[in-house]
Image (cartoon, grey):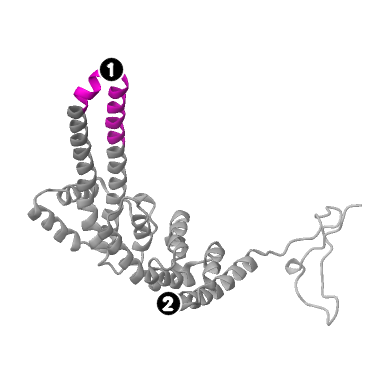
Amino acid sequence: MAENTPGLEPLTAEQRKRFQALLDSLDSFRKKRRTSAGRIIRGMPPDLVFRLAEMESERFQTRSRKGSYVSAAVLAGFALWFYRTPASNIEAQGTIFLALGVACLTLIAGLNILLPFRASKTIAAIISEQEDTRFVGLALEMLSRSDAPPQNRGYISATLCRLLPRMRADQRDLLTREQQRLLLIPLKSPMKNRALTLAVLKGLEQIGDAWAIPAVRELTDYWNGPSWGVGNAALECLAFLELRAAQSLEAKTLLRASEPADARAPDVLVRPACGPLSDTPPEHLLRAHFKRG
């Protein structure tokens, strides 16, 4: 993901090594070390902060998957033990093994949650301080994590509310297709986070196209009580989207010959049907196409 970000150079091996060390410091149990790493990151240019955040996102997902696999393996082991142990022994040994199982799962859950979330929390807070609209796509991915802690969601939602209204029409390519899909998710529950819904609609006015019309059209019925602003914003956004979709369709419409070319009449040129004869050179005129019969 990081290597395909538009407008950014690929990371060198030295940069990746440095970023990995910073992320490890953010995971540290020592507060002084975490604070120092956060200070260094905040002093970086936006481009490097963006790349570091991308690395953390990939790292977070990888570690979360590994933790889930280990938890599943431990549960499977205990299930197998209960299945193969005679019924007479389960009652006597069950309490001990159950206590051990709970302890193991608690440890695994702690490592799975606390370690990745230490760095993730700091990165989310740093992203919330950025003013670069390139962070919108990454913020959408972070917000979509089902295992993201509430505090991270608060940071990222605030970031999107601030940056989405600043998007420009020429920044449409900043979002991938998957990120475009994620952008529409807040519209499915518009009143859950009204401020985010309004920010998404404002951003879609600039970067949206035909792919956003169905989701936005569903919000045009929100006119009662506190949802009035959502319905009004949806109508304004829909007007932009339909205009842009019509322009895109018109741009894709090309002048084509209605019939296949006839090799027997390659020199027949098309001139105006009425009016004075044109002095346009023959090489600038359209050639007629005749149906083969």
Displayed quadrant of residue 290: bottom right
The residue mark sitting in front, 2 or 1, is 1
80 magenta-colored: yes
Q: Is residue 135 magenta?
A: no
Give SS at disc 1. Answer: loop
The tag on residue 86 is 1
What residue is drawn where x is 64% and y is 68%?
250
Residue 233 in the image, given as x and y percentages of width and height: 48, 76
Q: Which residue is mark 2?
A: 226
Q: Name the foreground residue: 288 vs 11.
A: 11
Q: Amino acid at mark 2?
A: Pro
The spot of residue 224 in percent (x, y) is 49, 77
Residue 127 appears at what percent x and percent y?
27, 62
Q: Which residues are magenta?
A: 69-94
Instruction: State whether the magenta stretch is mostly helix, strand or loop.
Output: helix
Does residue 210 sit above or below 68 in this rendering? below
Mark earlier in primary sequence (2, 1): 1
Element at label 2: helix
Residue 11 in sight in this render? no
How crowded is the residue under tag 1: few (<14 C-alpha within 10 Å), some, or many (20+)?
A: few
60 and 221: which is toward the camera: 221
Residue at the (58%, 73%) spot, across then down: 243
Looking at the image, residue 78 lies above or below residue 13: above
